[in-house]
Image: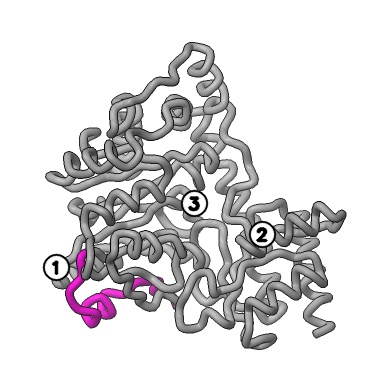
Amino acid sequence: MALLAHARALEAAGRDVVHMEIGEPDFPPPAPVVRAAQAALAAGETHYTPAGGLPALREAIARWYRERFGVAVPPERILVTPGASGALHLVLAALAGPGDRVLLPAPGYPCNRHLARLVEAEPVALPAEGPEGGPRPRDVRAAGPAAAVLAATPANPTGAVLGRGALAALGEAAREAGACLVCDEIYQGLVHEGEPCTVLEVEPGAFVVNSFSKYFGMTGWRLGWVVAPEGWVEPLERLAQNLYLAAPTLSQRAALAAFEAESLAELERRREAFRARRDFLAPALESLGLRPVAPPAGAFYLYVDCSAFTDDAEAFAARLLEEAGVAVTPGADFGGAEAAVRLRFAYTTSIERLREGVARLRAFLRRI
């Protein structure tokens, strides 16, 4: 976030910056979502909803699982939350406490380990680079007892995608560790290789965290959801009532329109646009000696090895921004043993801007 703030400051001073550090889609929400929000606001539909969310939205999410993945999820097992962060906070608060251990992938989304500490649990980082993604079942077994095992597919920052076999094996390893499997699927709609899946296809007892931010393009609306196993819904609802009462009503009303045919068609066109950007950027970076450390099969990130140019990715990223006007995220934000020689590139801008960024990067690498 400090690097983003500096990039904004440079722009305010008149510099042109190519943004490849922002983990946020550059597309607006689909038009039906905006219209639904306007209609709800005009109709005065702005009062509290039940803690678990609008019944109609829970039903729409359940229908989405059934139609997209062939999985029957009762609406009663779905809780609508203020973003995926609110969802994960709920789940970890229910599962873990002082002295408990939460196994999570490294590199991974930094807030996850902070949320574990917030409930006074110990975050335990497990390797998540390479073709397998992570965490790997063998590492879960070696780590010993835990309250929860957190996985992410597609993953931030690597873009790695876990298939059904990997998710089933991870679920088995979690059970052996006496842990609940929690799967972060917030980039689920953004799979560029193979058939998308959900952990619920192979592990119906897993907790799922999802969001309207990434695939649905509703980042600022702060809306997500949890799919909870039987027996966990009531405790989570009680926690929700005490933590935030309910997710934003206007966002929930708008999100109902995200599942309309017009919205889904637009979202699929955007997914293809992200894939085209990846197909440009990945080989362009490799040609410069910046190789992805995991197959970028999903999300909108490339996580690359920059050890050919530096042993201090933070200093490298700061210099790249200052001298070339290209903003990327250093690996220190995501953790992992090799964080000092890792950079994340987000292809959340147009191909034209990506081309400009690559040209500036190429010239920068020639100078250093």
Mark 1 residue type: Gly
Residue at 60 percent across and 72 percent down: it is 330
Label 3 CA crowd tier, 10 Å (few <14, some 14–19, many 20+) = many
Residue at 58 percent across and 50 percent down: it is 24
Label 2 CA crowd tier, 10 Å (few <14, some 14–19, many 20+) = some
Mark 3 residue type: Leu
* Callout 1–callout 2 Cβ contact below 8 Å: no
Disc 1, SS:
loop
Vertical placement of 159 versus 51: above or below?
below
Q: Which mark is residue 153?
A: none
Q: Which residues are magenta?
A: 130-147
Q: CA distance from mark 1 to mark 2?
A: 40 Å
Mark closer to the observer (3, 2): 2
Q: Is residue 109 left or right of residue 6?
A: left
Percent of width and height locating residue 63: 31, 33
Comparing 286 with 89, the one in front is 89
Q: What residue is shown with label 1? A: 178
Q: CA distance from mark 3 to mark 2?
A: 24 Å
Vertical placement of 348 versus 282: above or below?
above
**For the C terminus, which image quadrant?**
bottom right
Looking at the rendered structure, the number of numbered marks drawn on it comes to 3
Q: What residue is shown with label 2? A: 4
Disc 3, SS:
loop
Percent of width and height locating residue 311: 62, 87
**Mark nearer the N terminus (1 vs 2):** 2
Chief SS of the magenta region: loop
Percent of width and height locating residue 110: 46, 65
Mark closer to the observer (1, 3): 1
